[in-house]
Image: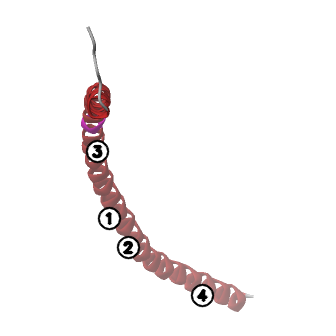
Amino acid sequence: MEITLTLKDLGLILIGAGIIVLLVYCIGFIKNLTVTIKHTNKILEDTQVISAIAAARAQDIDQAVGDVTESVSNISQSLKGNQSTISALSSIVNALVSLKNIITKMDK
């Protein structure tokens, strides 16, 4: 029994072997790619949950900051209004003290 291989047959055998190796490599690559995609999907789901929590907290903080700003503004306005009243009372007290001092000087 004689087997003769021509260069053409040898080239076809090498190309076939290369295709088989390429298929095995592609199967391994796709297997690893599906695992990577599953992990990526889990990470994206966690990211969506965290983003939703962060957005809710940001809205809560925004509302709290708005309330604090309004409270500080109201307190500031009240203090300004009271400061005018306190200044007026202080002026009246100073005037009364001055009158008392004038009266005591007149008595002497």
Residue at image x 67%, y 85%?
A: 101
Residue 107's disc number: none
User: Front-most of 60 and 88?
Assistant: 60
- The residue positioned 47% from the left and 82% from the top of the image is 88
Q: Position of residue 86 (x, y in %)?
A: 48, 75
The mark closer to the camera, 4 or 3, is: 3
Instruction: Point out the frontmost of discs 3 and 1.
Output: 3
The residue pinned by badge 1 equals: 70
Between 45 and 39, the one nearer to me in the picture: 39
Earlier in the chain: of badge 2 and badge 4, it is 2
Q: Which amino acid does label 1 sit on?
A: Glu
Q: Which of marks 2 and 3 is in front?
A: 3
**4 or 1: tag closer to the N-terminus:** 1
- The first of marks 3 and 1 along the sequence is 3
Residue 57 at x, y = what percent? 30, 46
Using the image, tell me which numbered label, if any, was put on residue 77.
2
Q: Position of 50 compared to 99: left or right? A: left
Residue at label 3? 51
Q: How far apart are marks 2 and 3 (CA)?
A: 38 Å
Quadrant assignment for the N terminus: top left
Q: Residue at x 34, y 67 (%)?
A: 74
Task: Say which mark, if any, is on residue 99.
Answer: 4
Residue 104 falls left or right of residue 4: right
Between the residue at mark 4 and the residue at mark 3, the CA separation in whole angstroms equals: 70 Å
Mark 4 or 3, nearer chain start: 3
- Asked if the residue at tag 3 contacts the one at tag 4, i.e. Cβ–Cβ closer than 8 Å, the answer is no
The range drawn in magenta is 42-46
